[in-house]
Image (tube, rainbow, N blue to C red):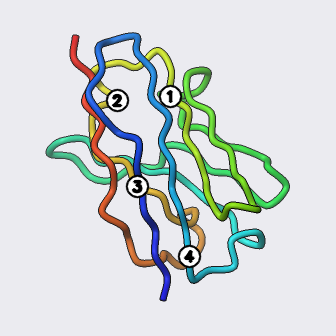
Amino acid sequence: QVQLVESGGGSVQTGGSLRLSCETSGVLFSTSNWAWYRQPPGKQRELVASIDTDAVTYYAVEVAGRFTISRDNAANTIFLQMTNLRPEDTGVYYCNVPPNWSPLNWGQGTHVTVSS
């Protein structure tokens, strides 16, 4: 059974940092590409960043230069280091495979709130 468990969210002020984690189980982690998504309040879920099996990364223009996605194949975990956070980064953050892959069951997500 596939499980995705996101953690690390919280409330910070503008300019703050957070490091999100996504622990996976029941999936061949090392042979999968991975991604972080977020859902701002009242909006649809959107792609934030992705990383492939060669650690090649992609970032949405809104977060490029501020967020860093990484993976630990030994721990079956992906990370999202977020710096210089802005109020528009507020939302629920989820991990899953990239949009061009068949999605796994979504986890509960982790809430990020950035206040001005």
**Residue drawn 30% across and 25% down?**
88
Per the model, the C-alpha gap separating discs 3 and 4 is 15 Å
Q: Residues within 10 Å of mark 4 (few under 14, many from 20)?
A: some
Numbered tag placed on residue 25 in the rendering: 4
**Residue tagged 1:** 82
Q: Amino acid at mark 2?
A: Asp
Residue at mark 1 to residue at mark 4: CA–CA distance: 24 Å
Q: CA distance from mark 1 to mark 2?
A: 9 Å
Considering the numbered disc 2 on the image, is that residue within a helix, a strand or a loop?
Answer: helix
Quadrant holding the C terminus: top left
**In the figure, 109 relative to 87: above or below?**
below
Q: Secondary structure at mark 1?
A: strand
Name the residue rendered at 30%, 36% in the picture.
112
What amino acid is labelled 3 in the image?
Answer: Tyr
Inter-mark Cα distance, 3 to 1: 14 Å
Question: Which residue does the numbered mark 2 point to in the structure image?
Answer: 89
Residue 68 point in image, percent of width and height: 62, 33
Q: Is residue 116 left or right of residue 56?
A: left
**Residue 28: image x %, image y %?**
69, 79
CB contact under 8 Å: marks 1 and 2 = yes
Tell me if mark 3 has few (under 14), some (14-19) or many (20+) residues whose alpha carbon lies within 10 angstroms of its own: many
Label 3, on which residue? 94
Judged from this view, the residue extending furthest toward the front is: 75
